[in-house]
Image: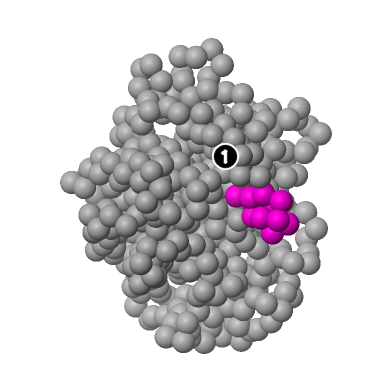
């Protein structure tokens, strides 16, 4: 398909990181001449250390290896994926994700191959001995490329493969051609939302399988946060309006969101906040297009912005409804993680909104207030609980980034820097985009401090590194 991705471009490289991958690695993709792959994998003759716990999860005992579609040479990689990668890939999902992810690995070759790519990259980053040879990994990349390039429409397995490669970009730091892989998942979601077998997006989410529902919601979430970086209208904006524009957040409300439609189980963010972020990105795109035409109406801009605030962001932090809990889970720790995450997103959405309305001015009263609220929400994350703090803080890098870029308060800067440092020091696998976020914030601070407080557009600073390697803040 024209404009699609090449799995041989899955990770951006640097001179210090690039190593030969075998025949064809780094060659021109059949998708596009702009995609190349160059990743540092290590051939190792040592045995792969066993994953923590039993070799096969008890709930899956006998399932993974009894399916004859699982190639022998992928079993170690897939075991590593299920035990070591999946738990950090979707930090706020509950344990049910493992069951349907296993089914996709069993029945979809592209999803299985992409999981192997992600697993191999994680093993290298975490310095696990890797028995898979470069030539073998190259064969997997080529197989993914052939599979995806030969299709005009995508299956559920293809969509999951795309999301796995997006995760690989995120593990690498969040820069690169992730948008092309997100587009694969988005095309599948488009086909589901427009399927004649359903009456609309809500009917799709209520009647589809767990795995399809997860793919749809995850793709939507990536779509929303990607729009912040790209300054484009979210692809599924009209769908968000249909799904989230007429519901409330409260479990005791008769029109409460059903669990199948709620975004809390996927990314720990209430529906109306997801819609708010999408609407703010839409407003930012409108503002920029009007400004370029010389026809921007500031009163209209402010009116639209205040409407978003009052409709979707007015609920006080911590308010999950009259009983104060997450209606989509019975696990109190999962609910607590999502509550913390949700409050951080709500506060940072206000920061985002007021930068659209007032520009990148940290001294703007509304921005000052919203940044302070975001910092306060971040301070509530318990640092003495490493599992909870990791799952929350790694899920809100967008919030940390935008609050950090829009503050001149040295106490806030120090707090955010220490917060990111603590996460980097605790993680042993050296994956994620925390270091990229910190570097971006520090460049913005340096630029603003050196110009006596002149506004600095954080997107412009981000693009200075590379026009093609936009940072995905997920």
* Res. 242 in view: yes
206 over 37 or under it: above or below:
above
Quadrant of the image containing the N terminus: bottom right
Residue 345 percent coordinates (x, y) = 42, 42
Q: Is residue 181 magenta?
A: no
User: Left or right of 315: which side holds 372?
Assistant: left
Residue 11 percent coordinates (x, y) = 53, 72
Looking at the image, which is closer to me, 22 or 280?
280
Q: Residue at x 67, y 67 (%)?
A: 5
User: Left or right of 246: which side holds 408?
Assistant: left
Q: Residue at x 69, y 82 (%)?
A: 28
Residue 298 percent coordinates (x, y) = 61, 44
The majority secondary structure of the magenta stretch comes to: helix
The number of numbered badges drawn on the structure is 1
Q: Secondary structure at mark 1?
A: helix
Looking at the image, which is closer to me, 109 or 7?
7
Q: Please say which color scheme the image uses.
A: one colour
Q: Residue at x 42, y 85 (%)?
A: 16
Q: Residue at x 59, y 72 (%)?
A: 467
57 over 130 or under it: above or below:
above
Residue 256 percent coordinates (x, y) = 53, 19
Looking at the image, which is closer to me, 460 or 297?
297
Identify the magenta region: 284-296
Q: Which residue is mark 1?
A: 302
Residue that sits furthest to the left in the current view: 384
User: Left or right of 380: which side holds 23?
Assistant: right
Q: Residues within 10 Å of mark 1 (few under 14, many from 20)?
A: some
Looking at the image, which is closer to me, 34 or 431?
34
65 over 312 or under it: above or below:
below
* Res. 68 in view: no
């Amino acid at each position: 398909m024209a404009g699609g991705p090449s799995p041989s471009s899955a990770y951006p490289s640097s001179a210090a990181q690039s190593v030969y991958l075998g025949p064809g690695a780094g060659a021109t993709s059949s998708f596009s001449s702009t995609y190349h792959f160059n990743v540092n994998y290590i051939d190792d003759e040592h045995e792969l250390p066993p994953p923590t716990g039993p070799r096969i999860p008890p709930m899956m005992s006998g399932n993974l290896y009894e399916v004859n579609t699982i190639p022998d040479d992928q079993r170690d990689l897939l075991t590593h994926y299920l035990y070591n990668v999946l738990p950090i890939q979707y930090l706020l999902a509950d344990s049910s994700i493992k069951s349907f992810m296993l089914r996709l690995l069993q029945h979809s070759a592209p999803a299985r191959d992409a999981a192997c790519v992600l697993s191999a990259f994680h093993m290298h980053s975490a310095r696990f001995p890797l028995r898979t040879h470069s030539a073998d990994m190259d064969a997997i990349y080529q197989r993914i490329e052939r599979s995806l390039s030969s299709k005009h429409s995508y299956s559920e397995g293809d969509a999951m493969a795309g999301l796995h490669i997006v995760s690989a970009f995120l593990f690498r730091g969040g820069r690169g051609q992730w948008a092309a892989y997100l587009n694969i998942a988005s095309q599948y979601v488009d086909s589901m939302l427009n399927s004649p077998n359903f009456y609309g997006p809500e009917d799709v989410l209520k009647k589809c399988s767990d795995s399809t529902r997860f793919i749809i919601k995850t793709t939507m979430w990536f779509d929303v946060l990607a729009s912040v970086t790209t300054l484009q209208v979210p692809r599924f904006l009209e769908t968000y309006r249909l799904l989230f524009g007429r519901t409330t957040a409260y479990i005791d409300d008769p029109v409460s969101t059903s669990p199948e439609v709620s975004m809390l189980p996927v990314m720990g963010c209430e529906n109306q906040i997801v819609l708010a972020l999408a609407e703010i990105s839409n407003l930012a795109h409108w503002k920029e297009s009007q400004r370029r035409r010389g026809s921007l109406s500031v009163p209209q801009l402010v009116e639209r912005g205040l409407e978003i605030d009052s409709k979707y962001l007015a609920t006080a932090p911590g308010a999950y409804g009259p009983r104060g809990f997450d209606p989509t889970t019975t696990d109190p720790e999962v609910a607590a993680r999502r509550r913390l995450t949700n409050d951080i997103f709500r506060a940072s959405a206000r920061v985002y909104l007021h930068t659209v309305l007032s520009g990148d001015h940290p001294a703007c009263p509304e921005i000052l207030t919203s940044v302070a609220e975001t910092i306060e929400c971040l301070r509530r994350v318990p640092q003495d609980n490493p599992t909870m703090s990791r799952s929350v803080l790694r899920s809100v890098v967008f919030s940390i980034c935008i609050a950090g870029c829009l503050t001149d308060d040295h106490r806030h800067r120090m707090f955010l820097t220490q917060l990111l440092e603590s996460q980097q020091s605790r993680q042993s696998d050296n994956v994620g985009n925390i270091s990229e976020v910190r570097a971006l914030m520090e460049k913005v601070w340096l630029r603003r401090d050196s110009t006596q407080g002149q506004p600095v557009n954080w997107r412009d600073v981000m693009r200075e590194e590379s026009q093609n390697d936009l940072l995905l803040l997920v």
